[in-house]
Image (tube, helix red, strand yellow):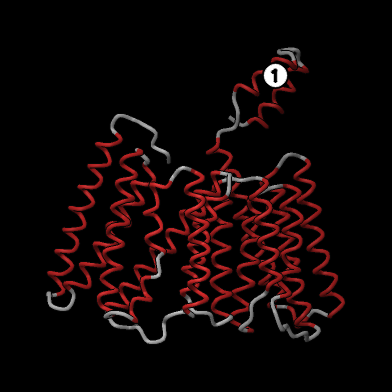
Amino acid sequence: MNQKWMKREGQKWVEDKIITSEQLDLLVARYPDTKEQSKITGILPILASVLIAIGILSFIASNWSEIPPFARLSLLIFIMISFYTAGDRYLKKGHEALGTSLNLLGIVSFGASIILLGQTFHLSAVDARLFVFWSLPAVYYLYRDRSKLYLFLLAALTIGGQIYSLNEFQSFSYLLLFLFITCIGGFVFLYPRKLETELFTIGLSTQIFILLIVKDFNLLWFLLFGFALYTAGSWVHKSVFKQSFKRLGTIIGFGFAYGLYFFLTNEIVSDFEPHKIYYLSVFILILALSIYAKRAENTFLSIWELLIFLPYFFLVELTDALAVGLLYLIVMFVYSGFMLAAGYRSENRAQINFGIVLFLLVCLMGYFNLAWAFMPKSIFFLIGGILLFILNAFLQRKKKQILKNGGPHHE
């Protein structure tokens, strides 16, 4: 049921004295807009905005050289102000999706104006400062209207600006990183929601990864960042941050274990270690903080979660690389097994599903390295597929048995 239509038509009923204004309020409250309807009606203006933005930018770009400089400036300012004005007008009328979409078009036209004016006056960019200025209107509207669409746009501008800076200038913009942490991080801290928090966590990890690439740091430092992110999940008080930080930190740790197993078992080990003293010093500090947090939270039994972050790769100096690679395989098996056991014990559906995925990935990697060299490829894929189906069926059946009585599924 559309509440706006009910209010408009209901006002006529009140004027005709069919119902009273109090009865109209009760009827409107009884039939609220459904989420599905809100999503559908909200998507259409956004899609329309994207198409309009593409059309405007394509038209201006294709005819840019034929437009006099003063007319270019006037046209860009007129388009930008028109979008902002129309957007605020529709927001005041209660058309949130349409008003937000028009304001988004205003932000897009603002960035396009900077780019096109730079081309007009032959201004050369030397860093990603353009994206800093482009992000400022998104910051303003994000905190004014608190719409997640502005958050997504701001994340795209700050992360996209870092990627652009990496590709074009081989540099990293600390301004964009500061803007991302203070504006997006501050917003999700004030208004914590699952999707926005996960976007912040992924975006922050992406920015740090780009920083390591630009500064030519050993990428194993990113494993340490994953450990720090996981540990931060034990120190923050808001549950939405705990889940997001710990989940992504675990994925980073498991991803590195997966990659190191592959490289070490294939003896790709030349100059891959970070500086041992610096790395171990930071690692010990994070390890101490993690252990202390687990004791404070009375979750010391989950100490096995730290297995995936231990720097086993330093053992290459003491033993064969193949043996260290196999150690990573064993650790991944043990880790995913512990995660499944913990999920079954607590009847945590999300943890069980995560454990199943990790366990199947470990089985796939172990089988791949074991059988690829000597088994005919058709038989290899056939047997591998059958084994994965059997393992998945067994684990899913076990999950249903555990959760059949209901219980705290903890999605």
| x and y percentages locating residue 135 in the rendered image | 72, 64
Q: Residue at x 66, y 67 (%)?
A: 177
Q: Secondary structure at mark 1?
A: helix
Q: Residue at x 55, y 76 (%)?
A: 212
Answer above or below: position of 278 versus 295: below
Name the residue rendered at 85%, 75% in the picture.
71
Q: Would you place residue 179 above or below residue 371 in this image?
A: above
Looking at the rendered image, the quarter that the N terminus falls into is top right
* Residue at mark 1: 24
Instruction: Answer left or right for 302 relative to 67.
Output: left
**Vertically, is 300 above or below 359?**
above
Q: Position of residue 400 (x, y in %)?
A: 27, 38
The quadrant of the rendering that contains the C terminus is: top left
| Residue 57 vs residue 253, the one in the foreground | 253
Please indicate whether residue 141 sits to the left or right of residue 188 in the image.
right
Q: Residues within 10 Å of mark 1 (few under 14, many from 20)?
A: some
Q: Give the percent coordinates (x, y) of residue 90.
A: 75, 45
Q: Work out whether residue 164 or residue 312 is closer to the camera in this orientation and state it.
A: 312
Please tell me how many numbered marks the rendered image carries: 1
Image location (x, y in percent) of residue 126: 71, 84
Seen in the image, is 166 located left or right of residue 353?
right
- Name the foreground residue: 8 vs 16: 8
Q: Quadrant of residue 313?
A: bottom left
Residue at image point 36% right, 67% down: 257
Q: Is residue 230 left or right of residue 154?
A: left
* Kind of residue at disc 1: Leu
Q: Quadrant of residue 8?
A: top right
Residue lying farthest to the right in this orientation: 70
